[in-house]
Amino acid sequence: MERILTKNVGKPNSQDIEVYSGGGGYKALEKALGMKPEDVIAEVKKSKLVGRGGAAFPAGLKWEFTRRESAETKFIVCNADEGEPGTFKDRGILLNDPHLLLEALVIGGYAIGTSKGFIYIRGEYYREIETVEKAVEQAKAKGYLGNNILGSDFSFNVQLYKGAGAYVCGEETALLESMEGSRGCPDCRPPFPAQSGFLGKPTAVNNVETLCNIPAIMTNGGDWYSRIGSPDSPGPKLFCLSGQVNKPGVYELPMGITLRELIENHGEGVKGEFKAALPGGVSSSLLTNLDTKLDYRSVAKAGSMLGSGAVIVINKDTSIIDVAKNTIDFFAHESCGKCSVCREGTRRAREILTRFSNGGGKAEELDLLLELGEVMYDTACCGLGQAAMNATASAIRLFGKEFEQKVRK
Amino acid sequence: MVTLTINGEQITVPEGTSIMRAAKQVHVDIPHLCYLEMLEPEYHCRICVVEIEGEPRLAPSCVRQVSEGMKVQTNSARVRRARRMIVELLLANHHIDCPTCERNQTCELLKLAFELGVKEIRFEGEKPHYELDKTSPTIIRDPNKCVLCGRCVRVCHDVQTVSVIGFVNRGLETMVSTFLENGLGNVECANCGQCIHVCPVGAIKEKSAVDEVWAVLADPEKHVVVQEAPAVRAALGEELGLPAGTLVTGRMHAALRRLGFNAVFDTNFSADLTIMEEGSELVKRVKDGGVLPQITSCSPGWIKFMEHFYPDLIPNVSTCKSPQQMFGALSKTYYVEKAGIDPARIVSVSIMPCTAKKFEAQRPEMADSGFQDVDYVLTTRELSRMIKEAGINFASLPDEPAEELMGLYSGAATIFGATGGVMEAALRTAYKLVTGKELEKLDIMPVRGLDGVKTATVNMDGLEVKVAVAHGLGNARKVLDEVREGKSPYHFIEIMACPGGCAGGGGQPISFDLVLRGIRGQVLHNEDKGLPYRKSHDNPSIKKVYEDYLKEPLGEKSHHLLHTKYTRREVV
């Protein structure tokens, strides 16, 4: 497959605007500015592009909702607060091809009807921040940002916000709270950010990878894009392969390749014997079927979720209890503490799994964990709490025997 | 209007209605913990969740608005399971010392656990072990009992606009604390105690003086005198099992005698005295071109708030001490002279609807008698606990009067406990001071009621006196900002720190219900109507104290004993 998202990665000085525009960069913007904003959105809808941050919401629809809001002031925010364990795809773009993102963001701003865009970037991404800041300056100097872009009536500026290290701020409503200077705690939806987002104004929040599909869609059309990969959720996907594989890394592959193809053809196989994989980072449920197709619908059908495409491979030497405990350690550490059910639920789940890990579990606590997982899914305010128990619950369902062996005799 | 179905019953409600409110139409009160009427919903607790057809997850009914055709189940098995488990989780992290917790009769978590049928706590593990915040002279916070519902944060920030508490740390370490965790005693806390009222559990309580008072009552060397603020008599009955709205003046005096107080007086006496002084001060300011508007000074929560946030308005604030402190000063001067007692033997106790009064009594300048003017302050709740502990059958007590010397009072004094009451009382006397005539229509209706800011104009023989009344510090800001900008049209402003005035003070029976506070205020207006004297200047004991001791309002003795100064305080 021709690389779309990573086509410039590997070129010398790929982060430089000259290299980017030399390879046809900012042509998509030129084309988009010649179209009506509604037509830009129609093209994105035609492409069937869905969000790559984890929730897989149709990107064109999100823009349409934001555009249709009657408020005069609107915003577009790029979510670059990449923080899910096992996810390291967006940083590759930020470091190597920041202009791809900027071009996409300007098109997004034009589409929804705003002249103000933000990039909320993970605070620990020091080099990425520096690279993006430099790219913004370059784009301003070349007239791709600022007033009357490419001689049009459209003006657009970008401002960077740096996160302060909270995973939950990658959740869009918490991200907006953080931008407003409040505690990074998720908000209730509805209203969705498209209706009431940053400073209460309609706001489209798009993940880095999602946006980076836009220039190619503008250039080649939505129909072209919709034929790539899986028909349900087409397009290229950046898979972050990690865990017990021989060649971990970021791979741009069409949606719908199988887990087996990813691990064997690209990751050069499992270190040891395959036991399971988390297809969408620590928020997802374990998969054991290597022939599962990696697209949003197929993974969901298999009982998990593709999320951001962080595929973590686990071999047979690894205790599944430790896998579960690791995921819960993470969520207990990253829970914002607002919802009682997530705060107290992750606290107790961590304690129970720690006891199991040390051979001191109680048999009835397995059902309790499953029930807790269901209640957290049902009642937590945001995706963090809703998904926190996914890995644990699937571990108990798929590898119950391992847990039973750790019950205190 | 939106039509929806709740539990199979179709209803129509206005757009924007929350599911929780809509459910009341089908006779369902959805269980909740962090939600509180009058505060913005913050959906922390997740207990009020309901099932909405077609949605993958449950939704918090406090914040989720109705939509056309929505089908809601408030009581499905899935909903009940979720609610139970959340309460179970909260209990697993709670210091369960219910028998000794002072909120065991009013604890919402305890009630929820029982009502939702939580039968066991299946989660075993660490309990929190935070240090208690005892830095405040008035309020103790126990983070080990806190359920992080955020109501205290919202009342402090949204209603009182004081904002000294907030969430700190993150996730499992989240707690409610102050700036830099300095403690409530080291921040701009007004000591209003509204956080106590909204706390669903025992995480916030007053700093009790019950044991200290028991000790002095048992000490034969001490002569213990007691005063009770107006609003106490309108609420003490509630705390002792009588219906809300029961006036218990006589039983209150009777109970205090049976607890062993040597002399039972009444703060209402000194409320009348306050009117004499403050009314005279107002007339003087108006006549001599002094600083106007004059602002009342009897609410110590308001005073500390002013000292932090509006110190530039110190010249506007009446120099009168509050009735509590006027009484305290006289108890160790006037009373001891009349009774022939060594003032060193006197212990002056006050019963207050207020937590801030504990702070006020400890202010270093409140020692004009040569001793600390007021030694101990008990809240209405603390007094009721003493009455219960002593086994006094409060309901069956006879009505007894307070001792006349400093216990006789007018109707003007008793309405101090309701928002607008000080204003009404002051106008009754100011009218006399300005015109030399008696005001005929004593009920000044525009300053009564529960509107946040109330205004009135009173014609005093051609002099149009404009007044305003604000209760709750958020409302106070509206009036004060006008004064600060030089746009205030008023001559006299009454400010009470607590919503509903003293009837809703931080020491009253636990409730944040403004309607209930209004009922307590009405009790006092009813008492006013039935009293033989309804104007402070008519009170014979007031005439006597001026004749025998103080000589005249704003006189030298008054200046020394009944007036005070304020302190500029910082905002960190």
Image (cartoon, grey):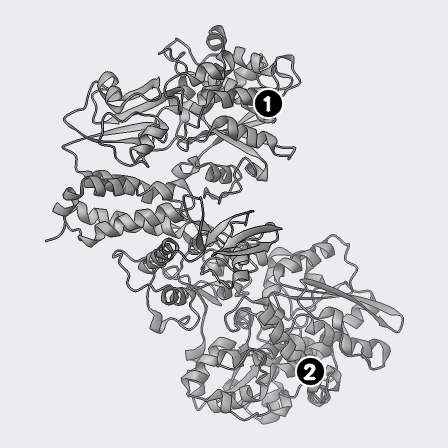
| Residue at horizontal 67 percent and vertical 73 percent from the top | B563
Q: Quadrant of residue A154?
A: top right
| Relative to B561, residue B294 above or below | above
Residue A21 rendering spot, x and y as whole percentages = 50, 9
| Residue at horizontal 25 percent and vertical 57 percent from the top | B124
| Residue for badge 1 | A38
| Relative to B252, residue B368 above or below | above
Mark seen at residue B244? none
Identify the element where label 1 is drawn: helix
Residue A33 rendering spot, x and y as whole percentages = 60, 16
Residue B523 rendering spot, x and y as whole percentages = 63, 79
Foreground of the two, B532 or B229: B532
Front of the two marks 1 and 2: 1
Foreground of the two, B494 or A205: A205
| Residue at horizontal 31 percent and vertical 47 percent from the top | A373
What crowding class fits label 2: few (fewer than 14 Cα within 10 Å), some (14-19), or many (20 or more)?
Answer: many
The answer to whether residue B379 of the structure is visible from this angle is no
Left/right of residue B393 with respect to residue B253 in the rendered view:
left
Q: Are marks 1 and 2 in contact (CB under 8 Å)?
A: no
Parent chain of label 2: B
The single residue placed furthest to the top in the displayed view is A22
Foreground of the two, A47 or B489: A47
Q: Identity of the amino acid at label 1? A: Glu
| Residue for badge 2 | B528
